[in-house]
Amino acid sequence: MSSLLRGEEMCLAQLFLQSGSAYDCISELGELGLVEFRDLNPSVNTFQRKHVNEIKKCEEMERILGYLLREVKRADISLPEGDVNPVAPLPKHVMAIMEQLQRLEVELGEVTRNKEKLQRNLLELTEYTHMLRISRNFVQKSSEREPLQVQYEEFPFLEKDTMMDYSSMQRLGARLGFISGLIKRTKIGAFERMLWRVCKGYTILSYAEVDEYLEDPDTREPTKSVVFLISYWGDQVGQKVKKICDCYHCHVYPYPSSNEERNDVVEGLRTRIQDLHTVLHRTEDYLKQVLIKASESIYTWVLQVKKMKAIYYILNLCSFDVTNKCLIAEVWCPVDDIPTLRRALEEGSRKSGATVPSFVNRIPTNDTPPTLIKTNKLTSGFQNIVDAYGVGNYREVNPAPFTIITFPFLFAVMFGDLGHGVIMALFALWMVLYENNRKLKNTRNEIWNTFFEGRYIILLMGLFSIYTGLIYNDCFSKSLNIFGSGWNVSAMFRAEVWKNGDISGNRFLTLDPNVTGVFNGPYPLGIDPIWNLATNRLTFLNSYKMKMSVIFGVIHMSFGVILSTYNHLHFRKKHNLYLVFLPELLFLLCLFGYLVFMIIYKWLVFTAKDSRHAPSILIHFINMFLMQGDAVQPLYPGQTGLQVFLVVIAVLSVPVLLLGKPVYLHWLRNGNHRPGMYRGYERVRRNSEEELYLMRAQDMEEGSSHSDLSTSGERQTEEFDFADELLHQAIHTIEYCLGCVSNTASYLRLWALSLAHAQLSEVLWAMVMRVALRMDTRLGVLVLVPMFGLFAVLTVTILLVMEGLSAFLHALRLHWVEFQNKFYIGTGVKFCPFSFSLLPSSFEQHGLL
């Protein structure tokens, strides 16, 4: 709990690594994830560091592994499941892995190229077959349309639309040529227009679409193609046609001159296609065997290469000593993990067989350490909520432990429904029970990953919603009469307040709690179910939930102000207790704490008999600031004097909050004795720089704030600026005083969203389920089933997802703005340990793993 409340105590340490054992030591540290390395060579270019060649080799292996993974994924071969965590390979084994990967890449590349070549040949033969089959129809149709009589016109083919008279062209001495092939269907229109414009009508184009889809060799997508046959007159026109075909990427095939030749070609194509299918099938089987063999070890290779690359990257952050025999590294490390760090270095030295062991040495520093807060599966989600606002300063109070309770509770106040809470809790419980399922964890659906990572948050929100649903006595907009209502209708007849004629003559009747036996006491748990039948139910719930929201808001903000004392005491800034914390707490409690007091007082003192004479709290609160307490009936004796006293205290706390801290610091730094300042809370005589340095080192070990340390007393005096401090405190005072008003009003969102959720639930029940349940015909059962399905879908989508998201965001805002800004600064740096398990992988980002 101590670590979760303040974070781990950190220290800066130096690692002295022998050159022969540095690789193994860093490998051990990467497996443990204990330390964060600092760059000791910030001025050295990345490409000028010592181990840049080893990193290039790792990147080359990553390139090969990426190629293998893409081929494995394309072949739809699943990687073997199981938690594999190989250690980083030794440097002497790197070349063996490199050679194995290169040999596998060459082999796979050759097989893949052969397969692609065979597929391309098969596609060409298939296209050629389609071209011969379809182009035969062109010639047959043309010959059928040719008239039997002999034509003697000079240019007979100009009078026939798409008909060729071969005998007429031969009489003219023209050389008739043919070009046939396939073109994509999307290009045929432009292709036809280009032929007409360029060839001036000296060509005849016939085309027809292929029935089946053909695979595009470049994109691997099925496309529609068109078979064309071009008849041209003259060699020059033929050259133009060939160039046009090349421009439109047509697949041109030789056109047979006779039917016998056509039949021979078709028969030869059929035989070659059968042979290609056989060879292609064997090639695919061999390729699959190679990929299956590679998939058995590829995940291990990926992890090994990732670890190797990370180790060499860390080695580039280290510096050599003067003898170039020892590597020096600086790391941030939790103080409690120093013994584990030493054991890891000893284990690395033992594995490498080094004669001189590596060791660690703590060093003092003035730098602010990073913030490390250790979490588990339950607390990590709430810690992420806090970190989204800002990472806490080093050893600052962490709001996450309190957020575990307050966040789901405030959510449930806005989402209070027993039925909806049960559905949400069951969904979260299912995710918790199957949290180790690989299919649930390793998905690329970001929305699902968001829900899965926050499963414990959703579980607690559901459980708290069940509780508030019982308090509101609301389950799918219906009340549960578990213990029996405390109101009795028959007592009104026994007391002869109601007559039998009153029931038939009035739509609404009022129960009088002052009549004996009508009200027998409050409901044991939550709101009495009779309020679900009352016409003034909304008025009653409005008053109840509005006052409840104000009470929760003031308590939540007061708790945030009280938590700031832990920071003041821990960082030894005791003056902030009197000059910051006390004025803030007095201002908040004297005004809004008094408002809570009046609400509770009115609940306890005024009964049903004198409730008509109960004064308005809002009027009293306004008159409190106007000093007009005598204008209305007092709530209790001596109210006016107490209210004036509280207002005076609240007003006097403002100048103390504004001027107290700047004046005190100014006097402290510019006193007659001009003491050497240390951390701004106590005055010490600075006899020497060494004494102050040792005090800083001691305080760092105790966990004090490093941001308040300075190099010397003179520097501290020079850095202090009264105007800057006054301006900063003025902004804080204005923000706090105005924020108390706006933040208290902001908690009214608890009332508004709770009311909206209840009304939406009631409307959904009235417009869907009530309509189906009131059908008393035989078809009512048939209508009830689809109506219930519609009700379930609308409940999940609108009331659970949309309303749940809305309540979640409002609860998030109440914690970030209204609660955390009272004590939480959140400008720290997160501790990022060197850990192999936390290293990102480019293969995972591209979905290859």
Image (tube, rainbow, N blue to C red):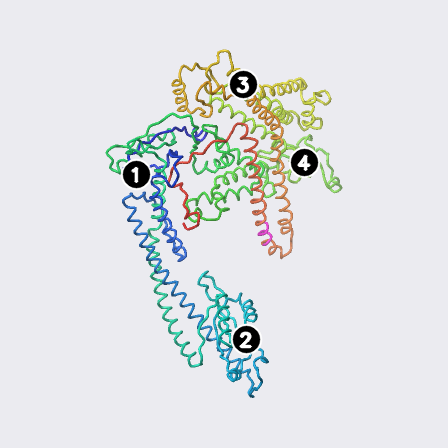
In x, y percent, where is residue 661? 55, 19
The residue closer to the viewer here, 571 or 158, is 158
Quote the CA–CA distance across marks 1 and 4. 72 Å
In contact (CB < 8 Å): disc 1 and disc 3: no
Label 4 residue SS: helix
Quote the CA–CA distance across marks 2 and 1. 79 Å
**Residue tagged by mark 1?**
24
Tell me if residue 181 comes above or below residue 796 in the rendering: below
The residue closer to the viewer here, 57 or 32, is 57
Q: Is residue 36 visible?
A: no
* Residue numbers of the magenta segment: 786-791
Badge 3 amino acid: Tyr
Quadrant of the snapshot with the N terminus: top left
Q: Earlier in the sequence, mark 4 or mark 2?
A: 2
User: In the image, which is nearer the foreground, mark 4 or mark 2?
Assistant: 2
Q: Quadrant of residue 412?
A: top right
Label 3 residue SS: helix
Question: What residue is rendered at 59% in x and 80% in y?
Answer: 159
Q: Residues within 10 Å of mark 1 (few under 14, many from 20)?
A: many
